[in-house]
């Protein structure tokens, strides 16, 4: 089971790398969009999780 | 090709502009909200906290209203190419039809299928599976937009096609060139990210409304923070890609960039000011009341300090030889069509690059036939055609400026909001919260003006330097055009009214509304969601 999962992840990694190389070469702005969108989502999500942490530290604080 | 009644051309243009602008009131929210929903749901799946599920469901409900009403408005435009722009479709359909067909497939099969699963799959799918579906909705809606922008870029910067003198059409050469056209890339990212900005302002503005009223505090604070961070990075990205588009216009559409900058005469670097205000006078070819910032234009447009940017007067003069050459191209093409003589074909090939300018001269040729222009008349026809290469400068100049000034406003609002939210001082900054609320429609306005910049600036062409707009329309009667225009205006205004009514209603009701209203913040959206979705679906069908 673990080996299958590892193989699956390895295939995903190789496909992602090939995708990145091709799109980065042919369409740098498309590539920037993919990377940028992921980054925007992660930063927005991190902001929310930070708010949860701030809330836990001082539950009665203003928002 | 025969000339079409100018009133019909104007009405066709007006109808297309109207339907496109109406359609684009819905599109940005779809492009952006889907990724915001994905962000919220990602946090839900990672942390397991119910509040993020509530957020994804509530904002998803507003997305559903927008999607159900908005999706129908795009379809009419696809038909308009056939009904109102049949000459264009004949000439350029090979190029334009392919991406449009893929868009249709994406929108209907990928986007719509996954939207259904997203709405009705909350209780039927595992958390990761539902999250994957939400990402696919976001990807699907943005990939639909991709194909439209690929098609639009091929009109602004035709690549991957050639003109076939036997079929008299542009023929498709390379799908890779069409998809990876630099203009398509920049347009896609600029427009998609403009959607992110719109969605972020929407979520932030409505959250600000709740905070101002002291309602749904935990929900609103989290939505606000996510939107502020989403918005500030997206605004930086939209400005960066705006610069890329400007640079591409400078390289490939010199008349558009000169009109955008109100530059009647070739610039004098490095001093040349960037005009923050001016009243361009198209008739007299000059600006009134100029207010400029010195030393900014050259680095902004040319990304250098010493490259002059060609002004519109000089571009007109430079067009003269191209117009004369285009007239020769059309004459050779006519002869080739009649006798299929290889010598005529060779002559056509020698002037082919300027063929579009030959079309442009038709309006001033005797009997609108460029082959009938005598040697004595040639100079006068060329001179009369030269000013036709320019777009409407006033419209292009101001639509661009409104978009740019708004983006500076967004930057300020998002940056301040992100800072105030991160330092937990939202409640005491009531003015900022009000500004966020009032700014909700502004990114959509910026988007509309972006399209006006791109499309008004492309004139007088439908396909840049290849096919003039006045040759692209269908030969309808004026009465038919007025009738259909009125019909669209009425129908689309009803859609907008329905959208606004439902959005206001459900935003006011807030996340606690419905069966779960009395039970505190935990939302059981299933009943609500179907409720909103069915209202919206019945309106759109
Ligand atoms: C400093 C900021 C900005 C700059 C320099 C900029 C630049 C441009 C340019 C040059 C075009 C015309 C592209 C063409 O020739 O086809 C354009 C189009 C457009 N802009 Fe902007 N823009 C900016 C901000 C924004 C903002 C804030 C939005 C919306 C939130 C927006 C939305 C659009 C849209 C929807 C289009 C039409 C589609 C396209 O051609 O990409 N822009 N922009």
Image (tube, rainbow, N blue to C red):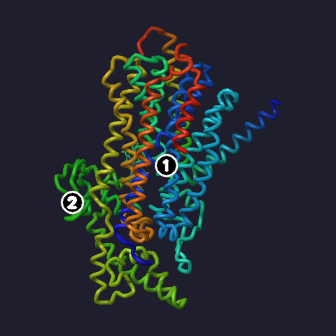
Q: Are marks 2 and 1 in contact (CB under 8 Å)?
A: no
- The residue sitting at 38% across, 83% down in the picture is B369
User: Relative to residue B186, is residue B505 depicted above or below?
Assistant: above
Tag 2 subunit: B
Same-subunit check for callouts 2 and 1: yes
Q: Which image quarter holds the C terminus of chain B? A: top right
Q: Position of residue A56 (x, y in %)?
A: 52, 11
Q: Could you say which is closer to the camera, residue B108 or residue B323?
A: B108
Q: Position of residue B108 (x, y in %)?
A: 61, 48
Q: Could you say which is closer to the camera, residue A17 or residue B417?
A: B417
Residue under numbered circle 2? B281
Mark 1 closeness class: few <14, some 14–19, many ≥20 residues within 10 Å: many
Q: Quadrant of residue B385?
A: bottom left
Q: Quadrant of residue B361?
A: bottom left
- The residue sitting at 28% across, 65% down in the picture is B312
Residue under numbered circle 1? B73
Query: For the residues marked 2 and 1, what is the alpha-carbon distance in whole angstroms?
Result: 35 Å
Q: Could you say which is closer to the camera, residue B112 or residue A26?
A: B112
């Amino acid at each position: 089971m673990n080996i299958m999962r590892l193989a699956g992840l390895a295939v995903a990694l190789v496909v992602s790398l090939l995708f990145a190389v091709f799109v980065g070469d042919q369409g740098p702005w498309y590539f920037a969009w993919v990377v940028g969108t992921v980054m925007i989502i992660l930063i927005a999500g991190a902001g929310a999780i930070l708010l949860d942490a701030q809330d836990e530290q001082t539950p009665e604080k203003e928002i | 090709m025969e000339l079409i009644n100018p009133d019909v051309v104007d009405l066709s243009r007006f109808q297309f502009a109207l339907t496109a602008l109406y359609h684009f009131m819905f599109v940005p929210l779809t492009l952006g909200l889907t990724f915001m929903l994905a962000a919220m749901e990602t946090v839900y799946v990672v942390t397991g906290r119910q509040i993020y599920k509530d957020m994804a469901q509530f904002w998803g409900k507003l997305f559903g209203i927008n999607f159900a009403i908005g999706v129908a408005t795009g379809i009419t435009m696809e038909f308009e190419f056939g009904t109102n722009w049949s000459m264009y479709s004949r000439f350029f359909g090979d190029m334009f039809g392919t991406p449009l067909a893929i868009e249709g497939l994406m929108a209907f099969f990928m986007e719509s299928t996954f939207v259904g699963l997203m709405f009705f799959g909350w209780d039927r799918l595992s958390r990761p599976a539902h999250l994957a579906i939400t990402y696919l909705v976001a990807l699907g809606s943005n990939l639909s937009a991709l194909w439209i922008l690929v098609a639009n870029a091929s009109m602004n910067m035709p690549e991957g096609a050639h003109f076939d003198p036997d079929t008299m059409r542009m023929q498709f050469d390379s799908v890779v060139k069409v998809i990876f056209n630099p203009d398509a890339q920049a347009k896609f990212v600029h427009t998609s990210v403009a959607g992110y900005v719109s969605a972020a302002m929407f979520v932030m503005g409505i959250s600000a409304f709740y905070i101002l009223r002291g309602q749904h505090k935990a929900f609103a604070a989290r939505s606000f923070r996510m939107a502020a961070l989403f918005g500030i990075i997206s605004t930086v990205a939209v400005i960066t890609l705006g610069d890329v588009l400007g640079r591409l216009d400078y390289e490939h559409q010199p008349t558009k960039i000169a009109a955008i900058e109100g530059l009647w005469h070739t610039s004098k670097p490095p001093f040349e000011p960037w005009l923050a205000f001016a009243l361009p006078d198209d008739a007299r070819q000059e600006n009134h009341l100029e207010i400029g910032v010195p030393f900014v234009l050259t680095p902004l447009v040319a990304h250098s300090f010493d490259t002059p940017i060609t002004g519109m007067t000089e571009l007109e003069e430079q067009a003269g030889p191209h117009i004369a050459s285009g007239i020769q191209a059309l004459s050779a093409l006519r002869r080739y069509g009649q006798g299929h003589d290889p010598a005529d074909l060779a002559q056509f090939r020698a002037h082919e690059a300027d063929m579009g300018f030959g079309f442009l001269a038709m309006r001033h040729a005797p009997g609108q036939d460029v082959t009938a222009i005598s040697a004595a008349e040639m100079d006068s026809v060329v001179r009369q055609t030269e000013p036709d290469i320019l777009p409407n400068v006033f419209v292009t100049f101001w639509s661009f400026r409104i978009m740019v000034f708004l983006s500076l406003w967004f930057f300020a609002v998002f940056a301040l909001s992100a800072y105030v939210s991160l330092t937990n001082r939202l409640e005491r900054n009531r003015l900022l919260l009000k500004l966020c609320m009032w700014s909700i429609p502004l990114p959509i306005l910026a988007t509309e003006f972006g399209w006006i910049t791109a499309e008004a600036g492309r004139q007088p062409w439908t396909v840049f330097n290849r096919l003039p707009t006045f040759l692209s329309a269908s030969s309808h009667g004026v009465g038919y055009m007025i009738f259909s225009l009125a019909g669209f205006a009425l129908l689309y205004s009803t859609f907008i009214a329905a959208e606004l009514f439902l959005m206001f209603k459900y935003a006011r009701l807030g996340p606690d509304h419905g069966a779960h209203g009395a039970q505190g913040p935990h939302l059981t959206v299933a009943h609500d969601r179907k409720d909103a979705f069915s209202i919206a679906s019945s309106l759109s069908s």
